[in-house]
Image: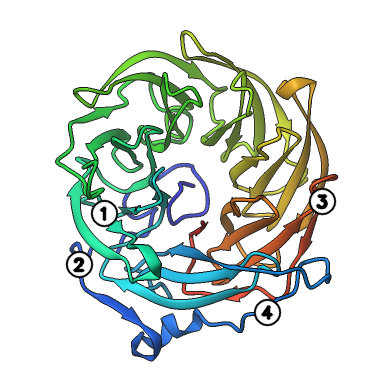
Amino acid sequence: MSAGRGMGAGAGAGLGRRHFMGVAAVGVAGLMVGDGAPAQDRRLRGTPREVAPDGTGSPSTRRPLFLGTYTSQEGGGTGVGLGTYDTAGGLITATGVVAGVADPSYLALAPSGRTLYAVDEREEGGVTALALPPGGAPPKVLGTQTTGGAGPCHLSVHPRGRWLLSANYLSGSVAVHPIDPESGALGERTDVVAHASPPPGPGQDGPHAHQIITSPDGRHVLAVDLGNDTVYTYRLDENAGRLTQVSYASLRPGAGPRHLTFHPSAAFAYLANEVDNTLVVCGYERRSGRLTPGAPQSTGTGAGTNYPAQILVTRNGRFAYLANRGHNSLTRYAVEAGGARLRLLDTVPVGGDFPRQIAFSPDERLLFAANQKSGTVTVFSVDAATGALARVGEPFAAPMPVCVLPV
């Protein structure tokens, strides 16, 4: 299903399918920390330890970590979760929550590291900016802007830090907002583009934009649409903040593309297909922005419903990892032929239910998995030589984590 709340794409996609609760957008409230946090958010607790994943006791430092959740669902949180993790042992400790940010189901950090952005995955979609003061002071909400669509489920910051891009799942559109260069606050949207063609795929009720990212060289913006089985390529006018479509790539009908990530060479990209449970290696032509999908590959999860979610690739281009929500596992691939080929190595139990999103720590020594249905975050150590994953400690309890962002 979509990035959002449900299990998989298919017939009847829409407001009910994504479990919207029909509540109005929540106004921005203040920061809640320590024992003043609601009981459900006091689950964001832990005890630091200074031990490396390999048991060597290597020195560790604590780094910030943010958690996205749903605020309109039973068992969800009350806003953006705040915490830290130790870089050696991976243990997470909660420090509070920025309350009142409505359904912040996906998070992204500005290139400067001074601002955090969240989607407000509501029927009247929005994007919210939070300033991250130096010295570990509590984040400050800078304001929310509407996306011009329903159910935004993904956002990203353009590499030069001047534009925020977001994908409206329910309305099948993508939006652009300007970013103030000094404060990081968002201005009114400068563009919103609906995906009108090609027609929806089998079992779909319309377009469902699921992701929007910028190519590594910054030349193009790519939007993945699950409902249309299509990846659209745009050019962004960086003066006016407007998108112009330059090409699109069609997946096989019923594939349900969900999440795309680039190989470091930028000559290839990897696309997770949620509906038909496959992974596709795509060629990427940098000058034109054209994406050329290859043959579908196995996720290693066998028969049955799986709903693959997000794929990551290491900075050195040697390994890739796929989150499997139905199988509750992470698939490990070896990247070969300069990025042109993926070889399935194994699947590892995630230790939770419905791993919605995964993320590396900045040094890629740790991998975090947000397990939506079990209300946990699992941490793995990553072997740099083999890419093998080893679970670190016990899963960390959190209210319906759908996005984890270690920084």
How many residues crowd mark 1 within 10 Å: few (<14), some (14–19), many (20+)? many
Position of 183 with respect to 155 (left or right) is left
Instruction: Find residue 128 and name its label.
Output: 1
Query: Residue at image x 78%, y 43%?
Result: 300
Give the side of residue 189 with respect to residue 160, left or right. Answer: left
Residue hosting label 2: 28
Q: Amino acid at mark 2?
A: Val
Towards the viewer: 384 or 114: 114
Numbered disc 1: secondary structure? strand
Under circle 3, the secondary element is: loop
Point 22% across, 50% down: residue: 183
Does residue 78 appear in this view? no
Q: Amino acid at mark 3?
A: Ala
Real-space Cα distance between discs 3 and 2? 42 Å
- The mark nearer the N terminus, 3 or 2, is 2
- For the residues bearing labels 4 and 2, Cβ distance under 8 angstroms: no
Q: Position of residue 326 (x, y in %)?
A: 64, 54
Work out whether residue 117 or residue 355 is closer to the camera in this orientation and state it.
117
Crowd rating for badge 3 (residues with CA inside 10 Å; few <14, some 14–19, many 20+) = some
Between the C-alphas of marks 1 and 4, the distance is 33 Å
State the residue at coordinates (60%, 54%): 361
CA gap, disc 1 to disc 3?
36 Å
Tell me the CA gap for discs 4 and 3: 23 Å
Amino acid identity at mark 4: Arg
Few, some or many residues within 10 Å of mark 2 (<14, 14–19, 20+): some
- Choose mark 4 or mark 2, whichever is in front: 4
Looking at the image, residue 300 lies above or below residue 382: above
355 to the left or right of 235: right
Q: Which residue is mark 3?
A: 388
